[in-house]
Amino acid sequence: MTLIDTHAHLESYARHGTLDAMLARARAAGVGAMISIGTSPEDWAPYRDLAAAHPGVVHYSVGLHPCSVEKNWAEAVAQMAGFWGRARPPGAPIGIAAGPGVPPCPVALGECGLDRFHLPKNDAAHAEEVFGWQRAAFSAQLALAKELGCPLVIHSRGAFRETVEMIDAAGVDWARVVFHCFSEGASEIAELNRRGGRGSFTGIITYKNADAVRAAMVGQGLARLMVETDAPWLAPVPHRGSPNEPAYVRHTAETAAQLFGLGLDEIAALTTVNARAFFGI
Ligand SMILES: [Zn+2]
Ligand SMILES: [Zn+2]
């Protein structure tokens, strides 16, 4: 059995020197690969190094998270294209190193998007200013993703409608778009699916009060199903409240298996095929 954690942030494990132990626990739990998701210029190069050190096991993405967007967002976004390499011939596959000694490419652009939940409180004018920067940074990243033709990892919180509208307006290929940590309901995921997009699911589906998210997952079906941890956050039951890690994606997969009436092995096989096809890994 092999599972893929399609969305984790490995920065804290690298910083605390616990990365190797975490990777060993992941391996023991059947997690054969993971994607370390970039959020700001501080983690992009370290994640590229991790991917180079653990080929085929750790992949990475490059993106400016809406909660990392500041006034100087344009400087950050300007550094992103370099991770895909300037020498990439038009139409060449993304994520494949151009040769020996060449650092690996990101497997996706993101996470990027809009987040109204974490806007500054108690200062409406500043919150609107920050949200304006978020929109501008998202728009620039959508344009880059369109140019690169790469998978796109979307973070949307409290801004589903606006996020969908901006993706529509940018003209990116919806088949390459995933709303990670999908936490809306069945009608919202149907909107993504109608466009060719998809949502992926975290440990939230193991939480008691998450009926709407479970309904969204079942409504989307098996053909687009992918699982993720969003580690170190959102640990699934029975680890809720402690730091999350890629090994725990197994609990999310077990819950998905129950909901679809399948075995864990079948869900693992399906989600791994889906993740490999979506990210090209
Ligand atoms: Zn996110
Ligand atoms: Zn994340």
Image: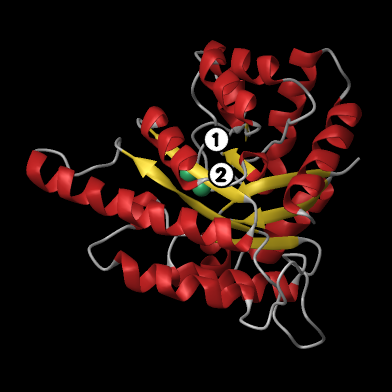
Kindly identify the amino acid type of the residue bearing the numbered disc 2.
Answer: Asp
Q: What coloring was used for the rendering?
A: secondary structure
Check mark 2 vs ligand 2: CB closer than 8 Å? yes or no: yes
Q: What SS does tag 2 mark?
A: loop
Residue 15 in percent (x, y) is at 51, 69
Residue 204 in percent (x, y) is at 55, 27
Instruction: Pick whichever, 230 or 102, lies toward us.
Output: 102
Give the residue at x 32% y 57%: 69
Task: Look at discs 2 and 1 and give the one toward the viewer.
Answer: 1
Instruction: Pick whichever, 164 or 32, lies toward us.
Output: 164
In the image, taking residue 245 as reference, residue 93 lies left or right, namely right
Check mark 1 vs ligand 1: CB closer than 8 Å? yes or no: yes
Name which quarter of the figure residue 119 lies in: top left
Give the residue at x 32% y 48%: 135
- Mark before the other along the chain sequence, 2 or 1: 1
Name which quarter of the figure residue 45 lies in: bottom right
Kindly identify the amino acid type of the residue bearing the numbered disc 1.
Answer: Cys
In the image, taking residue 238 as reference, residue 16 lies left or right, namely left
Residue 113 in percent (x, y) is at 42, 46
**The residue positioned farthest toward the bottom in the image shown:** 101
Asked whether the beta carbons under mark 2 and mark 1 sit within 8 Å of each other, the answer is yes
- Residue 100 visible at all: yes
Instruction: Pick whichever, 254 or 103, lies toward us.
Output: 103
Residue 268 in percent (x, y) is at 84, 35
- Residue 123 visible at all: no
Q: Which mark is residue 131?
A: none
In the image, taking residue 195 as reference, residue 90 lies left or right, namely right
Q: What SS does tag 1 mark?
A: loop
Instruction: Say few, some or many: other residues with alpha carbon within 10 Å of mark 2 (under 14 / 14 to 19 / 20 or more).
Output: many
Q: Which residue is mark 2?
A: 230
